[in-house]
Amino acid sequence: MLDSIGDDHGAIDLLFNRFENQVVGLPNQGKANLGEVTFFYPGFPLRLYALRVNNRSDLVVLFNGGVKSASTTQASKDLNLKWREACQFARRIEEALQDREISIDLKKQENTS
């Protein structure tokens, strides 16, 4: 999935649809068909958290995750802490962007492929 996001399709809405407050949980919810590839993870126990900066499909910050050991993130002892940390970091990043403490320089983007 990360190769597909990083190399092929970017952080498109279809793959970033598990909204959990300030972050998005990966993998995606439900089936996602992209050409010949289907992304479908029913009952998949691992979560990774991400922030799509300014909802862009080409700028993503990845955070920690872990095993979802209960029916909800909040009830999953170890995962709950990772999720709360990700939400706090995402909030700080968005505030820093808004306050112009962090800036995105679109002119210096380079294609390294």
Image (tube, helix red, strand yellow):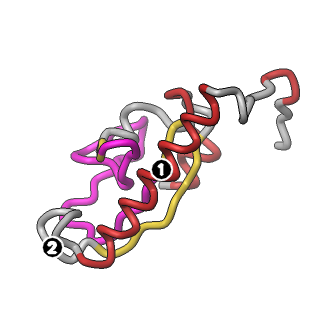
Residue 9 visible at all: no
Residue shown at 44% from the left, 61% from the top:
85
Q: Residues within 10 Å of mark 1 (few under 14, many from 20)?
A: many
Q: Which residues are magenta?
A: 21-49
Q: In the displayed structure, does residue 89 sit left or right of residue 72?
A: right
- Residue labelled with disc 1: 50
Residue 100 visible at all: yes
Residue shown at 31% from the left, 43% from the top:
21
- Which three-letter amino acid code belongs to the residue tagged 2? Ala
Q: In the figure, 39 relative to 70: above or below?
A: above
Q: Earlier in the sequence, mark 2 or mark 1?
A: 1
**What SS does tag 1 mark?**
strand
Does the magenta run of residues contain 73?
Answer: no
Quadrant for the C terminus, please. top right
Q: Position of residue 111 (x, y in %)?
A: 83, 35
Dot label at residue 70: 2
The total of numbered circles placed on residues is: 2
Does the magenta run of residues contain 32?
Answer: yes
Residue shown at 36% from the left, 61% from the top:
83
- Which three-letter amino acid code belongs to the residue tagged 1? Ala
Q: Residues within 10 Å of mark 2 (few under 14, many from 20)?
A: few
Q: In the figure, 21 relative to 13: above or below?
A: below
Residue shown at 40% from the left, 31% from the top:
13
| Residue extending farthest front | 99
Q: CA distance from mark 2 to mark 1?
A: 20 Å
Q: In the figure, 68 relative to 110: above or below?
A: below
Q: Position of residue 69 (x, y in %)?
A: 21, 77
Q: Position of residue 68 (x, y in %)?
A: 26, 71
> Which quadrant of the structure image shows residue 58?
top right
Q: In the displayed structure, does residue 70 sit left or right of residue 31?
A: left
